[in-house]
Every structure is written in structure tokens, then in C-alpha cells.
Amino acid sequence: MLVIIGYIIVCGSVFGGFAASGGHLASLYQPLELVMIGGAALGSFFVGNNGKSIKATMKALPTLFKGSRHTKELYMEMMSLLFDVLSKVRKEGLMSIEGDIDKPEESPLFSKYPGVLSDHHIVEFMTDYLRLMVSGNMDAFQIENLMDNEIETHHHEGAVPGHCLAKLGDGLPAFGIVAAVMGVVHTMESVGIPPAELGILIAKALVGTFLGILLAYGFVSPLASLLEQKLEESTKMFQCVKVTLLASLNGYAPALAVEFGRKVLYSTERPTFGELEEHIKKSKTK
């Protein structure tokens, strides 16, 4: 929603200011300039990226028009799930959660938290390391190193769509210049026509530069920045799980282990100690 609002503000400010200063909006309507700029940008996008990057970028684009799913409620749900799992381990032993982590979608523990269960990446991360804990063959330092490597891999993979869009945004002003140059070439071919008509051709050529810069800095580059922010939010969930599980491995009680995880969250989404405690109590009654 904020993306659409931002686009409306960009268009309203640029085109509204142009019209208010006496400009004619019709002169900015140059579909062939858009074809040249958009087509060249799309072609370069396919040339400069492999199939995996293109697919990842196409998959990420729809998420840009949705609000962030990483809310305080989701974090509290995830930490309540971790508390339940670690409490079961403390009471019944590590082997008691083997069925839960093998088939989390059928687990009574995981089923209580549909928001977390719907994110297969975080569920897989959580269950994989709980499985390693059950095996008992790795110490906390080995698991922490493995977690760091996996989180780093996740971050690099998640950065691909933003990187692709950033490169595309960087190239759009240049393609706008290409379109403008083509317009100038056409104008120079028509130097014999009346000055009034010649002015129209020059104006059309300049629109290409304008469109390239507007599309780059008003539309595409902000999307790349938004993808980076969303990636940071998703990575924070993995860090929360990591800190909580490591605290449990080091012998801390479930309540304290979850508190470790709570502390790594961003302050804007971090629940207070009391809010998390109340949420955990409510989840026990379900």
C-alpha cells in the first residue's frame, strides 16, 4: 500500500508541478520513448541475470505491494512456539520432540502457531537445528558456526532480487539518454522543417531523458531499497531462533532462553517482557 501511495506522490509532484508551471501534459505522452527505454531495460535485465536470479526477482516483486509480515504478533507467536518446544524438551527429554520436528505440519505444538507454520523457511531452520540437538553429536559452538553460515547463505540469496532491481535502476537513466539521442538524430534528419515543428521533435527527444531518470529514481530504485529492508526483517527471525536455541543448549531454562531471543529483535517490533509472558500464558490455554 505504501508503494502505491509513494508512486502517487511521485507522479503528482512531478506531473502536477509541470502542469502548474504552464506545461502541457500531452507533450510528455511519448509511448515510443517508453518502448525504447523499457524494452532496452528489460533486455539488459535478461542478459545480466541467470535464470535463478530472474525467477527470484519475479517472485519477490508481488511482496513489495504488501505490508511487512514481520510484526510483533508474529515474533511473539514464534517465541511462544520456541518456549513450548523447549519446555517439552526440559520435561520429557529431547527424544520427545522427534515426531514434532519430523512432521511439523502434523505436530500439535506447531499447529497452535499457524503464522509461523506458514513460513516454511523458518520452520525448516528451526526443525533442522532441533534435530541436530536431538542427535546429541554436536556442541553449541559447532551448531552456532553452522547457524551463522546458513543465515549468511540465506541473506545472500535473499539479496539477489534487490541487487537485480538496483542494477536495473542504475541503467534506466542511460537508456533514457539512448532514447533522447535517437530523438536528436531524428530531429537532425528533419532540420529543413519549420522551427515550430522542429521544437516539437526536440521536446520529444528530451522526454526520453526525463522518463529514464524518473523511472530509475522514482520507481525502480526505491523498490530495491524496500527489498533490502524486507530481507533484514526476515533475517532477524533466523537470528532470534538461533539465539534462543543456543541459550537452551548452554543450559538456560526455556523462559530465559526465549528472553535471549527477544533481546535481539528490533525495538519497533520487540514485545516487552510482560507482553511476551502474557502471550505465552494464553498459548498454554489453547
Image: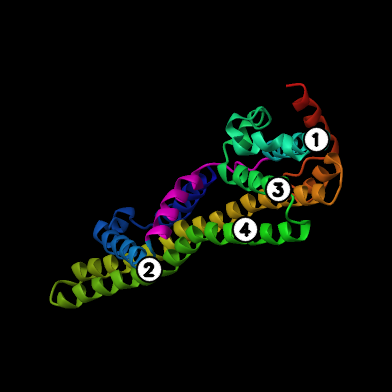
Helix, strand or loop at mark 4: helix
Residue 77 seen: no
Find the distance from the CA under tag 4 to the CA under tag 1.
26 Å
- The residue singled out by tag 3 in the image is 135
197 on left or right of 37: left
Three-letter residue code for mark 4: Glu
The front one of 131 and 277 is 131
Quadrant where the C terminus sits is top right
First in residue order: circle 1 vs circle 3: 1
- The residue singled out by tag 1 in the image is 87
Tag 2 near tag 3, CB within 8 Å: no
- The residue singled out by tag 4 in the image is 150
102 on left or right of 76: left
Find the distance from the CA under tag 1 to the CA under tag 3.
18 Å
Helix, strand or loop at mark 1: helix
Instruction: Give the numbered dot on residue 48.
Output: 2
Q: Tell me the magenta residue range.
A: 51-71
Which mark is in front, 1 or 2?
1
Three-letter residue code for mark 3: Ser
Which corner quadrant of the image does residue 158 belong to?
Answer: bottom right
Residue 226 is covered by the magenta coloring:
no
Find the distance from the CA under tag 2 to the CA under tag 3.
44 Å
